[in-house]
Amino acid sequence: MAELTDFWALALRTHWGLEAKLSRLDGEYDLNFLVRATNGQDYVLKVMRPGCEAQLIDLQVEALKHIALEAPGLPFPAVHPDLNGAVLPEIPDQNEQPRLVWLLECLPGQCYAKAAPKSDELILKLGRVLGATDRALEGFSHEGLHRPNFKWDLTQAGWVTDKLDAVADPTRRALLSEISADFQAISDRLAGLPKQAIHNDANDYNILVEGELGQRQTISGLIDLGDMCAAPRICDLAIAGAYIVLDHPKPEQALTALVRGYHAANRLRADEVDLIWPLLRMRLAVSVVNSTLMAAENPNDPYVTISQAPAWRFLENDAVNGGLMSARLRAACGLPVTDGAERIHAYLSEHRGQFAEMFEQDLNEVPMGSLSVENSTWPQNPFHMPLDEAARVGEEFGEGLWLGYYNEPRLIYAEPAFRKGPWKASDRRTVHLAVDVFAPAGTVLHAPMSGRVEAVENRDAHLDYGGVVILQHETPEGDPFYTLYGHLDPEVCDRLKPGDPVAQGAAFARLGDASQNGGWAPHVHFQLALTTDGMQNDWPGVGDPDEMELWHAVCPNPAALLNLPDEKVFYRPTDKHAILQGRHDHFGGNLSLTYDDPVMLVRGWKHHLFDEWGRPYLDAYNNVPHVGHAHPRIQAVAADQLKRMNSNTRYLHPAQTAFADKVLSKLPDQFEVCFFVNSGTEANELALRLARAHTGAKGIVTPDHGYHGNTNAAVAISAYKFNKPGGIGQADWVELVEVADDYRGSFKRDDAERANKFADLVDPAIAALQAKGHGLAGFIAETFPSVGGQIIPPKGYLPAVYEKIRAAGGVCIADEVQTGLGRLGEYYFGFEHQGALPDIVVMGKPIGNGHPLGVLVTTKAIAESFDNGIEFFSTFGGSTLSCRIGKEVLDIVDDEGLQDNARIMGASLMDGLRQIDSEFACVGDVRGMGLFVGVELINPDGSESTEICKYVKNRMRDHRILIGSEGPKDNILKIRPPLTIEAEDIDMILWTLRTVLSEVGDYTPAPVCDHEHHHAGCGCC
């Protein structure tokens, strides 16, 4: 190998005058070398196989020159002539065989096959590059473009038909035969399209991508023109599409992005778009047949058959709806989804107001009722719609006629059939594609216009349509379109059959009741479709919010047929961008939003949240809804108490003592006194006052990077806040000690004495406070530091600290806001794990499950020290409402076994995370207990990786999982879901995290250069 590279390095120096180091690149037939020249530039040296036709290379060279002239901004490599000006010199190799050799610019980036993620934005950019390339090549001509019997020319792909017997599997052979037949059916149309020069091989190894780990990705190169030929441009797009869809989790969405990008750069016609799908499949058929033939010739080469696997996975994927593909891709290009679509729209618009009234009355004054995610709470559980709820949907709008919106995202489509993936937080169909008319059961329906029965059925499955009729109509020009009427009395099946005519205005059906119409409140689901290709009689009544471009085109607003203006029935969710602008306009800049693309959340249930379009998110971050979002018992208690009264602790109420009894029942006997406040911040501020009143001292010792609230005194003991740039700095009455982090701290896990060594760091802090005259009021710590990085201190740390604090006269305060109330699974409070007994315990956010509530409990002696004659009063702390909610939260934890659930789910999560830790070098540490979990992400040198953590957090959000990040360098993933989380959700977190971490690869942050002026070989850039 060294001899080979040395030989061609010498040839490079001789013919191009370049001193360089060469390294071998992959090549099927030819020699390819990466050239790193001493002039700071990189090149690719291509040494063609002996006997290579010069015309083939000349074709590529001339094409690259043409593209550079016509579209210099496209990412194609420049060709560098040798010292004599020759672009393709002939150079003898070591065996004196003449070789054609050429030198190209080396483009930056990695091949698309290795790039991640393969986002819609990146694929769109690829489409634009390919479209612009084909446009630039329109005027290019060369004798080498005409390649008879070229197996990779898609217009000649029919050759595979005679080779299908090579495929042994009869099912696969039948599939390929079907694909070949579809190709044959379009061959005349394909032959009628103009031919031009095309790249012809935009596969995932010929596309280069630049941009890593959260940077905006760009297409940095389109290389290897060796398969160029003359063919219709649509072949180029179909070939690229055949590679883009392989092993993509959303192949239809990926192909749509590619076609949209191509169309933006090189306008397509509808007849061309219709050929993409059969051509794409035929390209894959050519690929698998060719590799099968090669495998027969090279039976000892396993790669030949392994390379087929992605193609077969795609071709055999029944979830991809090929019947809808033309409509999908036409819609992406802004083209009519059928050839008659524009005439149909014109007809409906022209005759608006002239159609027969479906309910024999003008619907313009009939009120609208919203069942949207934002405006409705149907169903209570967005993952299950019981029949008793379905039968009452919309009862708040009364018994008369009312209309339900088109384009309305709803959560009433709750059952698993509406999911598009394995998880509850998978993509979900939520957006209504029809107009509903709610009316009493038995109400007669009249046909808006004449038509023929396309289908009449009784779909009696759970929450299906019941009786359903589909009518076919035609415009005067003969363009067909269809209307669907769902939730009918199934008696219609006895009166109508397919083919029956239905006259305009004819009474043809009536509304069914809940026992007849699938289980719903009586109404008709009225839907319009311009085509039934890919749907036949099984129309989706609701669509994925991310596919509305398709569904608005296929199933447009049917308002015209109801003689209504479109706007009356077209639902428009709150505009997230307007809300975001309002935040910027009216809120402080330091009120942060999570994620690069913030989410707007309007509904919740247990450990899931929903945005304005009904997209579900797994909430693996928010510890405040301790027993889950929208818990029915908390709703009921709050509503019940607000019907009665809500006052403060100046008046007696049994809810106050009942709540105190419940809280104290969870604590050691020495705790006898409760103070109820509005937040953990207020509770921590109060804890400082109690400590100072009891000790007469002021000084506080606290671990570094802690957080205890946002009031002045709470910020003063929160290094997480006061030590930040722009912070107030450390008060002289506060002494910080190192966090007891045995992964990154001064004392590691292999040190058996690490707990005592961390505790010993308190001694100089106490001495410093005493030396400054402040004395020691106490020690306060998050029992398990959360913002410090989800730290689990070594066992024995807190008892040793508390002993030192008490010996110096101080009070020990346990901030259990993050860790208390059963979150840790094995322990109700974190101090129990430590075997420590604090003097004051603080509880916050989770104890109210979102209601503003905090609790401080302490000993009677400390409480008496604080009782100095000055009243302590918090207007809303300990209100009757707060006390009832707080007690209900603690009761729910007990009644629903949520502490045990935290133990079981936490153990499963930790087991999975430890396995991930063993698989990915960027995972430095996994730590946690119950549902208090941290994953520390690191760079290859072991340093904290803020960049990887940010990337992972945002990508998890893209996958619909909400997690946080913490730590002094913000490099620790924080996972702390509501205690209701289930096994399926743990699986989703682990599967998704593994997927996202695989995208990180061997990322290394760019080195920081401290050279004022760069110099050759500095290695900084």
Image: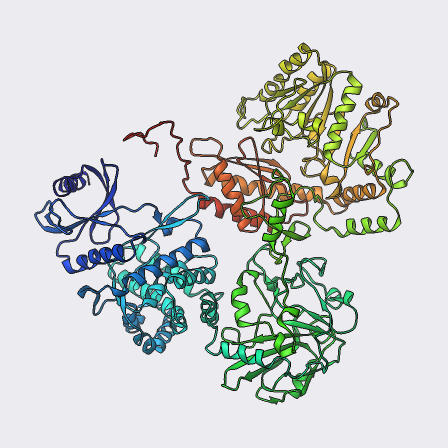
Q: Which residue is the extreme one toward the left?
A: 96
Q: Quadrant of residue 674?
A: top right
Is residue 810 visible from the viewing direction of this image? yes
Q: Is residue 897 above or below residue 801?
A: below
Instruction: Answer left or right for 726 relative to 439.
Output: left
Tag count in the figure? Answer: 0
Instruction: Answer left or right for 204 relative to 575.
Output: left
Q: Position of residue 229 (x, y in %)?
A: 25, 65
Q: Name the residue nearer the viewer: 111 or 740.
A: 111
Q: Position of residue 837 (x, y in %)?
A: 73, 25
- Image quarter in which the N terminus is found: top left
Instruction: Answer left or right for 285 relative to 226.
Output: right
Q: Which residue is the extreme one toward the front?
A: 585
Q: Is residue 169 above or below residue 967?
A: below
Q: Quadrant of residue 762?
A: top right
Is residue 53 visible from the viewing direction of this image? no
Task: Look at the image and name its color scheme.
Answer: rainbow
- Image quarter in which the C terminus is found: top left
Q: Name the residue nearer the viewer: 919 or 97.
A: 97
- At horizontal 61% and vertical 21% (from top left) the residue drawn is 737
Q: Name the residue nearer the viewer: 157 or 46.
A: 46
Q: Quadrant of residue 745?
A: top right
